Amino acid sequence: MIYMADTANIEELKKLYYYFPLAGATTNPSILAVEKKPISEIIPAIAEVVGNGMMHIQVSSLTADDMLKESLKYREHFGLGDNYYSKIPVTLEGLKAIRMVKDAGINVTATAIFTHQQALVAARAGADYVAPYVSRLDNISSHGIEVVEHITKTLNHFQLNCKVLAASFKTVDQVHRIVKRGCHSATINYALLEALRSHPMTDMAVDTFTIDSKGIYDIEF
Ligand code: E4P
């Protein structure tokens, strides 16, 4: 399982990259809108923080032709390399765009996935990643974890060259359960990444170690 940061906040991203073993960053128009800054500022800043790590940047266009143009424009305008993934929602036009963007040599992450079949058809179209939305499924009394599990099993079963990038997490338990089901990767926001690392027993243990270490560790470093 690999972790990515689901944020476009550059301070958060820097802090997360400083402490966590992250494989990349993901955004969508809503995540970008929170920052109240134009993408011409945010995308280069994300690129600088992630370095060679993956950058999953979502298109805002609605037709396949425009999604292709937008993806090509980002690559050219921001000088993005092989670590750039164009995030494309699995609308009908998006499905067509996945093939077109892949044919243009750009990686694709099919997003806004809510069903097993959406994921499979996106994978067949050439998507490198499919992003099912766990919390949004749970919030409509559906089963986000099961959808992730079924997609993961199917991609593995048919040996498709596509991985699951589970998204839309609200709890540590959701992350825990998709890991147990063999999910390849997850994109997680700042607060939740910190929450899945932290535990009061760890802090208590370190407090005790610190007290007990006094006067024993006599070598300078
Ligand atoms: C990935 O980037 C998804 O767009 C994101 O995780 C969706 O999260 P949300 O359901 O909390 O908006």
Image (cartoon, rainbow, N blue to C red):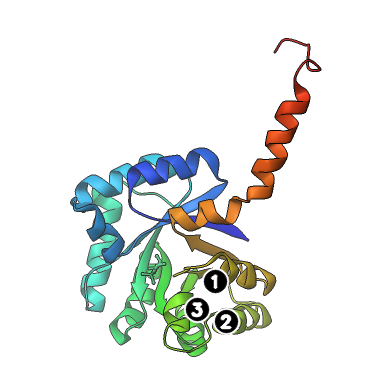
Residue tagged by mark 2?
151
Residue 51 seen from this side: no
Q: Nearer the viewer, residue 143 or 98?
A: 143
Label 3 CA crowd tier, 10 Å (few <14, some 14–19, many 20+): many
Q: Mark 3 or mark 2, which is nearer the start of the sequence? A: 3
Dots 2, 3 in contact, CB < 8 A: no
Residue 123's disc is 3
Label 1 CA crowd tier, 10 Å (few <14, some 14–19, many 20+): many
Name the residue: 38% across, 76% down.
Answer: 99
Query: Separation of disc 1 and disc 2 at Cα?
Result: 7 Å
Q: Mark 2 or mark 1, which is nearer the start of the sequence? A: 2
Question: Residue 69: x percent and y percent?
Answer: 23, 66
Tell me which amino acid carries mark 3.
Answer: Ala
Query: Separation of disc 2 and disc 3 at Cα?
Result: 10 Å
Query: Separation of disc 1 and disc 3 at Cα?
Result: 10 Å
Which circle, 2 or 3, is nearer the viewer? Answer: 2
Left or right: where 63 falls relative to 221: left
Give the position of the N terminus as an image quadrant.
bottom right
Name the residue: 44% across, 58% down.
Answer: 189
Which circle, 1 or 3, is nearer the viewer? Answer: 1
Residue tagged by mark 1?
164
Residue 199 seen from this side: yes
Question: Residue 214: x percent and y percent?
Answer: 75, 19
